[in-house]
Amino acid sequence: MWLIVGLGNPGNEYKFTRHNIGFMAIDYFLQGLGNPPSKNQFKAEIFQTKFQDHQLLFCKPQTYMNLSGESVQPLMGYYKISLDHLIVIHDEVDQPFGKMKIQKNRGHGGHNGIKSVSGLLGTADYIRVRLGVGRPANPNIPVPDHVLGRFNKEEESQMPEFLNRCGDALESILLDGVQKASTKFNT
């Protein structure tokens, strides 16, 4: 079984913010799988489904970003998921909007959701799909305000293509492995 986690914040006020692109990627991928029903478990909204021969458990932690590990760590224990079958999708300010990077065993880079997941797991040795949201164009805008802000019109128009590419990257990780997927999708 694979655990695929999208990081974000619960609540309508955060729904279309840059920080919630992980949630958006999960929702987009699940649409293609027929929108399986959700249930709440370990402070998370989870969706269980199958893709080809793979059992998939999707997770959207409902703890707010900074406590995301409080959902991920118990889910991994309960479903007996190994670290090499954990994929975490999250926003990345150090990449321009629309760029993606698949990596494994990297530091948190100041991302509090990743800091929480890695801290509670005791390791960073899992797969991450970092979705670029860019830094603020105006240097006077603090990064936290930027990531909690909504996408601009141009970004919104490119979002379906970006999320579709993220879905293709997830499929590639599952079918081809992380090495081939990163070679193919890292930009």
Image (spheres, grey):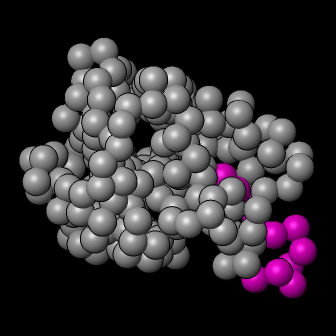
Residue 78 sits above or below residue 26 on the image: below
- Front-most of residues 20 and 141: 20
Compared across the picture, whether 165 is left or right of 175 comes to right
Residue 24 lies, in percent from the top left, at 58, 47
Residue 54 visible in the displayed image:
yes
97 drawn magenta: no
- Front-most of residues 171 and 47: 47
- Front-most of residues 171 and 177: 171
Residue 134 lies, in percent from the top left, at 74, 60
Q: Residue at x 24, y 17 (%)?
A: 53
The N terminus, quarter of image: top left
Compared across the picture, whether 30 is left or right of 117 comes to right
Residue 178 sits above or below residue 141 on the image: above
Q: Quadrant of residue 93?
A: bottom right
Q: Residue at x 56, y 35 (%)?
A: 28
The C terminus, quarter of image: top right
Q: Residue at x 30, y 66 (%)?
A: 43
Residue 72 visible in the displayed image:
no
Residue 88 sits above or below residue 146 on the image: above
Which stretch did the figure color magenta? 132-142
Residue 52 lies, in percent from the top left, at 31, 15
In the orientation shown, which residue stands out farthest toward the top? Answer: 52
Residue 114 lies, in percent from the top left, at 42, 67
Q: Quadrant of residue 3?
A: top left
